[in-house]
Structure formats: structure tokens, C-alpha cells
Image (tube, grey):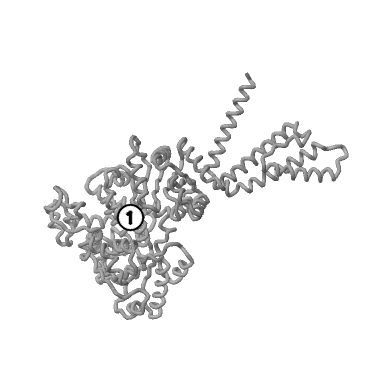
């Protein structure tokens, strides 16, 4: 009976050790890949020492000679090689095998070397095996750290994996792909999968009909946050996966599950209000919009703000911008530029260069019929990189306040920006230039030296700070919370944001993205830390500043809706009790500042006061988001 018990305990201990090792290796595979070879060499050296001791003393005689020591040395070297093939040969050392301490040391060394060799093989070439192991442990025991589930193998997902591992090294990253996608396996795809694995993620293939089940199971087991990021290059597959997750029957929605879906703007606008998405924390992301947003939130963008003409929050002059090359990024950039300029009460004129601009901007202009109330769009026929093009910027009396190169060809954008910058410098004209890039390259260093701002790099867009921990959402939540509490609702910003409609999120983000310009118009900058109350004191002393900023906020809000196809409507055109009709894109408050009181009397709401109250609360909003305002020197 005792022998059976010992046998069972031995098997249980062995099984437990194997499970622990599998869990430990799957969790720390990068560490083993980095240091596994070093440890294996260490154990080979220890193994050599053990063998040498065994051969030397196991065959020792009274008159052992130097020749015996040399023989033991070479035998030990030979036997050390057997560790590589996991061959047990303790019997070769004769008498030493009967010494318990020697047997224990020999067993530990052989076992450790065997494990390290197996780990190195699996860690370096067994990405699929490691992914399955990690998935098994996540589904069984969960995780104490964040879990990132990325759908789609592409260069973009490689960038995201690399940055997530850098910002959250304890998090677990699984990159998912359907088994049907292996049919189009190529060398490029294999390189991408190797890069993903090298940067700390596990690649996992799965059956399409079962993916929503294990994704939700992992999220429910995670004790911190779990992120499902749908970024397949075929965007319709992202929507398909999202639908399968949201329509899963009988599954409780995990509290800390966040869904990120990359798709095109028009597709997002059509489906985002679907009722099946309302209970989920879904972040709809358009890569073109992310590129534009990255620029708008950058310090370089604020260089185009005419601070010298700013008088108490208002700039009394036209603001001219040039956009060279039309693309999805250019369209999204215009949606940000047009409202942003209104913050300081300026009239904006955007010049579009190239004969193709008229054709490519047709949809943008026709789909936004009231756009002319917010911006003057001029189609310039000078083709980029022609004599007429360069002469236009040399001789024009009003050189643009900023020039944006946003064509679809990133290399051409770069080349054209450098050439135009060279021409402008020769004629002593200093104009901020912004170039849409694709990847960070050697040319990026040249741009930085020349004072040209690059934006929209894939490495920057597909990053932890932009997609997952984007500071804009922090400010947008604070803005949304401000409005909810203003109307008397109880709750915190996370609760309000989770139940917000797509329209409310859009409106809050549109306000938040232009807070830096509004702060700049007030003569301040945004910094980390706690507010000192100087902004509120300035507003109390300067009622004109308050009025100008309030008017600017109304103009910004109007322009942001005009850029989304909204028009002004009468109360009779609206649903009962509402001041807007999102389906028809009509809003009663899309009127000049002076006519707001008239609309307000109909709805028994002081809309001018609401804008003024918002301006006075910017410091509080920033504080809620973790920022403060500092007087600009």
C-alpha cells in the first residue's frame, strides 16, 4: 500500500510540476527566449562539472595520474553533449551513481537542462503551441493583469503589439486569425507572425463559428480589463466579429470588457446606432480620423494659432489654410480644422490644390450642404509640383497660415513638402508645414531638422496611447459628465459614458478635441497637475473674454455639426419635446449667437448661458480628466 501511495504521489507531483512549468513558460515566454540560451549553457557547464566529478572519482585509483584527469575531462565533455539529446547515462560514472547527493545533483541538472532545451524550442518556433497553452490557462484560471485580444495579422497589429508590450509589459496579448486565412499564407504573413511573436504576443488560430464564445469567456475570467481590438485589414470582418460578440445568447456582458472596431467613417455612421451595440463599451475608430486627430492634439498644430492677433479670446482676421492632395485623412482633417478655427471667432478659408480636388471633394461638399456657413472652400487649379504652383506661394499677398500635405502617396507628400519649404525659405516666408506620412523613415529626421511636422505614421496611430489610453476620451468623458450633471443627473463619468449614444460621444469628443485651442485663445496652455484657479480669476476680471470665448464655443459647435451634414431646423420639424432630429440631421440651435435666446424661449432653456457656463467650467473639466491650465508666458 505504501508503495502505491508513493507512486501516486510521485505522479501527482510530476503532473503539478509539468502544469506549473507550462503556465510559467507561457506567461514568461519572452524572458525564456531572451535568457533561455544563457541558462542552458550554464546548466551544460554544471553538467560537465558533474560528469567530470563522476568520471574522475568514480574510476579513481590510488595512483591516479594526470592522464586519468585528462581522460575524465574528455569523457565529461562527451557526456555533456548527451544532455542535448536528453540521454540518461549516470551508470557510466560507476561508483558515483550510488552516492545519493551525486544522484540528486545529477537529476536536477538533467531535468533543468531538459526543460530549458524544450522551452527554448517551444519559445522560439512554437508560437501556436504557446498560444494554445496561454489560452487554456486564461480560460481556466483567468489573469490578474490586462488581456489584449487583437483580431487580424498585419503590419498595423505588429506596431500595436510592440507598443502594448512596452506600455503594459505584464499584460497578455493574443493575436487572433481565422483558420480559413491560412489558405493565403505568404512569406510576408509569416514574417508578420514572427514579429508579433517576437514582441511578446501569442498567435492563435480559431474556428470562426466559435470565436465569440472563447473571447467572452476570457473576458469574464479576467480580473482587470480585457480589450478586444478588431483591426483586420478587411474591415467588414471587424464588423462581423463585433456582431457575433454582441449577439451571443445567454452570455453576461463582462464589466471590464472594451471593444475597439476599426472601420470606415461612413460604415460606422450607418451601423453604430444599432440597438445591439447599446449595452457594450464600443470604441468606433476610423484610421484616417485617428491620423487627423493625432495632428490636432499635437503641440506642433498649435503653432498655426495666430497668438499675436489674439485679443481677449478673439482673432479679428481671416485664417487661410492650404490642403495639397485629397484623401480620407484630408477630409477628416477638414472636419477638425473648420470647427477649431471658429473657437477664436475667425473666418476660415481652405484652398484645395489640384484639378482632381473638385472631383474628390464632391461628396464632402454635397453631403454637407450647410458647410458654406462655416468655411470658404476654394478650388485652386495650380497642379502641385508645377511652376505655377510654386509661383503662387511666392507671389500671393496672403500666404497661408498653414499648409497640409495629405495625398495618398506618402513619399510624394514628403518630397513636395521639402521642395516647397526650400522655395519658401529662399523668399523669407515662414509657414508651418504638416506632412501625412505612412511609416517613420529616414525622411522623418529630415523633416524634424527642417521644422516640418509629420503626422499620421502607422507606428503612432496604431499605438497604446492613441487606440487604448487616448487622452481625448478622458476629456470627452469629462465633457459628457459636465453636461449630464448640468441637467441634474446623478452618476460618475464612466457610468455616463457607458450609456451615452453615438451622437453624444461624437459631440463630446468634438468639444474635447478643440479644448487646447480654446485654452490657447484664453492665453493658457494645458499641463499636468492641479489647477491654481488663475483661469477662473481671469474670467471674473474680463467679461469680454468670457463673451468672446462663449461665442467662439457656439461657432465651434455649429461648424462641427455643419461638417457632419446637419442643417438648421424649426421647432415644428423636430420630434415632440426635442431640439434636434438626428435622423434628418436638423437642429434648432444652429442659428447665429444673437438668435439663441429666441430658440431658448421656445424650449425654456438659456442656451447662451449653457455655452458661457461651459467656458467657465473648462478648468473643472480638465481637472476631472487629470489636467490643469497654466498662464502662457
Residue 219 in sight in this render: no
Residue located beneath label 1 in the image: 264
User: Seen in the image, is 86 located left or right of residue 410?
Assistant: right
Q: Pick the quarter of the image with the N terminus.
A: top right
Residue 330 in sight in this render: yes
Residue situated in front as seen by the camera: 232 or 49: 232
Q: Residue at x 53, y 39 (%)?
A: 23
Q: Quadrant of residue 629?
A: bottom left
Q: Quadrant of residue 399?
A: bottom left
Q: Position of residue 257 (x, y in %)?
A: 38, 43
Q: Position of residue 614 (x, y in %)?
A: 25, 55
Q: Position of residue 572 (x, y in %)?
A: 11, 52
Does 211 sit above or below residue 426? above
Residue situated in front as seen by the camera: 440 or 178: 178
Density class for disc 1 (Cα within 10 Å; few <14, some 14-19, many ≥20) is: some
Residue situated in front as seen by the camera: 408 or 67: 408
Amino acid at each position: 500500500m505504501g508503495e502505491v501511495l508513493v507512486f501516486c504521489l510521485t505522479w501527482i507531483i510530476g503532473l503539478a510540476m509539468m502544469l506549473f512549468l507550462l503556465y510559467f513558460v507561457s506567461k514568461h515566454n519572452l524572458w525564456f527566449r531572451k535568457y533561455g540560451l544563457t541558462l542552458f549553457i550554464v546548466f551544460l557547464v554544471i553538467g560537465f562539472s558533474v560528469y567530470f566529478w563522476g568520471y574522475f572519482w568514480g574510476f579513481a585509483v590510488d595512483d591516479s595520474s594526470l592522464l586519468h584527469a585528462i581522460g575524465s575531462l574528455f569523457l565529461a565533455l562527451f557526456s555533456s553533449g548527451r544532455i542535448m539529446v536528453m540521454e540518461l547515462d549516470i551508470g557510466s560514472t560507476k561508483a558515483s551513481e550510488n552516492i545519493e547527493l551525486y544522484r540528486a545533483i545529477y537529476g536536477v541538472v538533467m531535468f533543468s537542462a531538459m526543460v530549458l532545451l524544450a522551452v527554448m524550442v517551444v519559445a522560439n518556433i512554437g508560437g501556436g503551441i504557446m498560444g494554445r497553452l496561454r489560452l487554456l490557462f486564461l480560460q481556466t484560471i483567468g489573469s490578474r493583469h490586462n488581456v489584449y485580444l487583437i483580431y487580424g495579422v498585419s503590419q498595423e497589429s505588429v506596431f500595436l503589439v510592440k507598443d502594448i508590450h512596452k506600455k503594459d509589459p505584464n499584460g497578455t496579448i493574443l493575436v487572433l486569425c481565422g483558420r480559413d486565412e491560412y489558405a493565403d499564407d505568404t512569406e510576408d504573413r509569416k514574417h508578420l507572425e514572427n514579429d508579433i511573436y517576437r514582441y511578446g504576443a501569442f498567435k492563435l488560430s480559431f474556428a470562426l463559428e466559435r470565436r465569440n464564445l472563447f473571447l467572452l469567456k476570457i473576458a469574464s475570467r479576467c480580473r482587470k480589463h480585457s480589450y478586444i481590438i478588431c483591426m483586420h485589414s478587411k474591415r467588414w470582418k471587424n464588423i462581423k466579429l463585433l456582431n457575433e460578440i454582441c449577439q451571443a445568447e445567454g452570455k453576461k456582458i463582462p464589466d471590464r470588457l472594451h471593444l475597439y472596431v476599426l472601420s470606415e467613417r461612413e460604415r460606422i455612421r450607418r451601423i453604430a446606432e444599432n440597438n445591439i451595440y447599446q449595452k457594450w463599451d464600443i470604441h468606433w475608430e476610423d484610421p484616417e480620423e485617428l491620423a487627423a486627430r493625432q495632428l490636432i492634439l499635437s503641440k506642433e498644430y498649435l503653432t498655426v494659432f495666430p497668438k499675436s492677433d489674439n485679443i481677449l479670446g478673439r482673432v479679428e482676421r481671416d485664417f487661410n489654410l492650404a490642403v495639397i492632395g485629397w484623401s480620407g485623412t484630408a477630409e477628416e482633417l477638414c472636419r477638425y480644422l473648420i470647427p477649431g478655427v471658429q473657437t477664436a471667432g475667425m473666418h476660415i478659408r481652405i484652398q484645395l490644390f489640384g484639378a482632381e480636388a473638385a472631383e474628390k471633394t464632391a461628396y464632402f461638399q454635397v453631403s454637407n450642404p450647410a458647410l458654406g456657413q462655416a468655411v470658404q472652400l476654394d478650388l485652386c487649379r495650380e497642379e502641385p509640383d508645377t511652376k505655377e504652383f510654386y509661383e503662387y506661394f511666392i507671389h500671393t499677398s496672403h500666404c497661408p497660415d498653414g499648409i497640409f500635405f495629405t495625398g495618398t502617396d506618402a513619399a510624394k507628400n514628403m518630397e513636395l513638402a521639402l521642395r516647397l519649404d526650400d522655395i519658401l525659405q529662399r523668399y523669407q516666408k515662414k509657414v508651418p508645414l504638416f506632412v501625412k506620412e505612412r511609416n517613420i523613415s529616414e525622411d522623418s529626421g529630415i523633416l524634424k531638422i527642417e521644422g516640418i511636422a509629420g503626422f499620421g505614421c502607422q507606428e503612432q496611430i496604431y499605438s497604446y496611447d492613441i487606440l487604448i489610453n487616448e487622452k481625448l476620451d478622458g476629456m470627452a468623458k469629462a465633457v459628457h459628465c459636465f453636461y449630464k450633471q448640468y441637467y441634474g443627473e446623478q452618476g460618475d463619468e464612466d457610468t455616463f459614458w457607458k450609456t451615452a449614444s453615438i451622437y453624444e460621444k461624437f459631440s463630446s469628443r468634438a468639444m474635447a478635441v478643440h479644448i487646447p485651442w480654446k485654452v490657447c485663445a484664453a492665453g493658457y496652455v494645458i499641463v499636468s497637475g492641479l489647477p491654481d484657479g488663475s483661469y477662473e480669476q481671469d474670467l471674473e476680471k474680463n467679461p469680454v473674454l468670457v463673451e468672446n470665448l462663449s461665442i467662439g464655443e457656439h461657432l465651434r459647435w455649429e461648424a462641427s455639426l455643419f461638417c457632419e451634414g446637419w442643417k438648421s431646423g424649426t421647432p415644428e420639424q423636430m420630434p415632440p419635446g426635442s431640439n434636434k432630429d438626428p435622423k434628418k440631421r436638423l437642429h434648432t440651435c444652429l442659428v447665429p449667437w444673437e438668435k439663441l435666446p429666441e430658440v431658448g424661449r421656445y424650449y425654456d432653456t438659456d442656451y447662451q448661458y449653457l455655452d458661457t457656463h461651459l467656458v467657465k467650467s473648462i478648468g473643472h473639466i480638465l481637472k476631472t480628466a487629470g489636467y490643469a491650465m497654466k498662464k502662457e508666458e
